[in-house]
Image: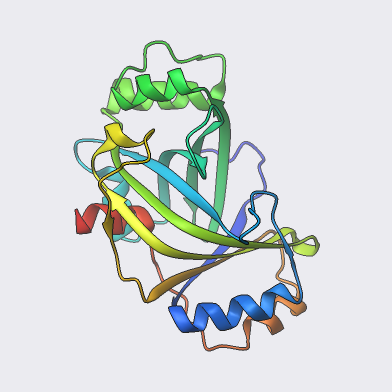
Amino acid sequence: MMTDNKIGRHELKHQLSYLESMVLSNHLKAIFKKDDHTLKNGYYIVNSLYFDNHQDAALKEKINGLLLKEKYRIRYYNEPNDHFKLERKYKIGDLCYKETSKLNKEEVIKLIKGNYEDLNTDDPNKFKLFLRMKNKGLKAKSIVSYQREAFIFKAGNVRITIDTKLKISNDIRSFLTLDTPFLSTKSDQAILEVKYDRFLPSIVEDALGIICIKTSNYSKYAISRIVN
């Protein structure tokens, strides 16, 4: 997997109790700006459709803690519309990389059905997905949805997110509806993610230091497959 001269980002994940997440949220609100997806209620909903092959390669890469990992997902925010993103996310050692392309609703429907022949292969990211689906049997596997509160800080290109109310489903054909038959995970648990480029500013470290946090290898996709 080549990085194509892209800048890798550091990604730290921490599991919090719901109470810890509320304390941290109130503290961060006084220091950092919310990101552009935020609704008036201070949150937004993230909906993701994850892909894997018949051998569950992406799942095994995560569980086995491999230094080289790759996964594909389609994502939209809040309610279904015509603004979807195809994301190829891969990790080399401690650095994460992401390639993003736009998808329309028709393309998403076809990919859910396993139809990759009509993908615009002029787009490098879509072409890679085309090859994975054709040659390695990649297909849609599971849906993950959760409530996200996100903060940004310009120095270090920092993004802090707190995810709660995680829900999962393996009914992939319901990805574009609002009646997905979800299973809820632990309601008293939250996931804190901290992403940054070359350095983590001290103001961010100090803000996160108000609670005791432990780095984890948490994966929403892995949870969705294991629970289902």
Residue at point 40% right, 63% down? Answer: 165
Percent x, y of residue 94: 52, 61
Percent x, y of residue 193: 54, 66
Using the image as rendered, state which of residue 5 and residue 97 is in the foreground: 97
Q: Is residue 41 above or below residue 205?
A: above
Residue at the outermost top position? 118
Image-based side of 227 in relation to 207, left or right: left
Residue at point 51% right, 22% down? Answer: 104
Quarter assignment of residue 149: bottom right
Using the image as rendered, state which of residue 139 and residue 132 is in the foreground: 139
Residue at point 29% right, 65% down? Answer: 185
Percent x, y of residue 181: 25, 46
Residue at the outermost right position? 155
Total number of numbered discs in the rendering? 0
Percent x, y of residue 24: 59, 80
Residue at point 76% right, 75% down? Answer: 31
Using the image as rendered, state which of residue 129 and residue 223 is in the foreground: 223
Image-based side of 204 in relation to 104, left or right: right
Image-based side of 178 in relation to 158, left or right: left
The colour scheme is rainbow
Image-based side of 62 in relation to 216, left or right: left
